[in-house]
Amino acid sequence: MELLYSPASPYSAKARMASRYLGLDVTAVRVDTNAEPASLMDNNPLGKIPVLLLDGGGSVYDSVAIMHYLNRLSGHKLYPKKDQKRTEAEVLEALCDGITDCLLAIVYERRSRPEEKVHQPWIDKQWSKVVKGLDYLNANLPKTGKKLHGGHFALAAMISYLELRFAGEWADGRKTLADWPETFSKSFKDYAEMKASA
């Protein structure tokens, strides 16, 4: 299988980490979404990444659908089997993806408009959601041991994106959250290598 990805995409990072953790035979293929290559557009009409290209033909997108596909492919090793734990993992993933959505909305607002047309109230609204989400996570981090799940990878991808685009703007007063990647890297040994190679 091939996973179409972009180095800066947190959703791609989540799926790439999960596939590596599960030991699945997935080759990461870097694509430029702005160029709209056929490999992307023919497999996701939205032209968004990540996209998982299946060996037998066909594709899976977006990141949540990919995560659940990988879970089934691995014999259900990516999410807890017990309903309550499974729900907790899925809610954590949803929260981290939601925060990431807000971060991307801020980045795109600044990037796609001339400076004089950037709508600061929109940015402020998105950032207020980010702040609430980060504060919640700082006080309610998941247990992180040998067994990882989709929520862990969403959290790691979100923090990596914060470090990439919002360095110096989020970690003050959130030491527990800021230190979590070190704990995560002990459970997922490939974390540092994948960040470096992105």
Image (cartoon, grey):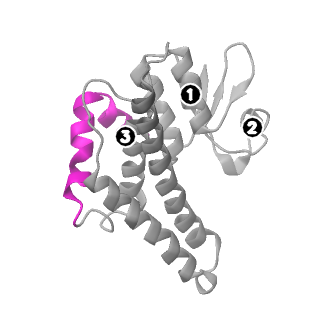
x, y percent for residue 54: 67, 19
Tell me the quarter of the picture where residue 167 sits.
Answer: bottom left
Question: Which residue corresponds to the image point at 56% horizontal and 27% vertical from the top-left?
Answer: 68
The reply to whether callout 1 and callout 2 are in contact (CB within 8 Å) is no
Q: Residues within 10 Å of mark 1 (few under 14, many from 20)?
A: some
**Is 56 positioned to the left or the right of 81 in the image?**
right
Which residue is nearer to you in this view: 91 or 14? 91
Q: Label 1: which residue? A: 68
**Is 185 positioned to the left or the right of 152 in the image?**
left
Q: Label 3: which residue? A: 195
Q: Label 2: which residue? A: 44
| C-alpha separation, residue under disc 1 versus residue under disc 2 | 17 Å
Q: Give the range drawn in magenta.
A: 173-198
Amino acid under label 3? Lys
| Residue most extreme to the front | 84
Amino acid under label 1? His
- What is the chief secondary structure element of the magenta stretch? helix
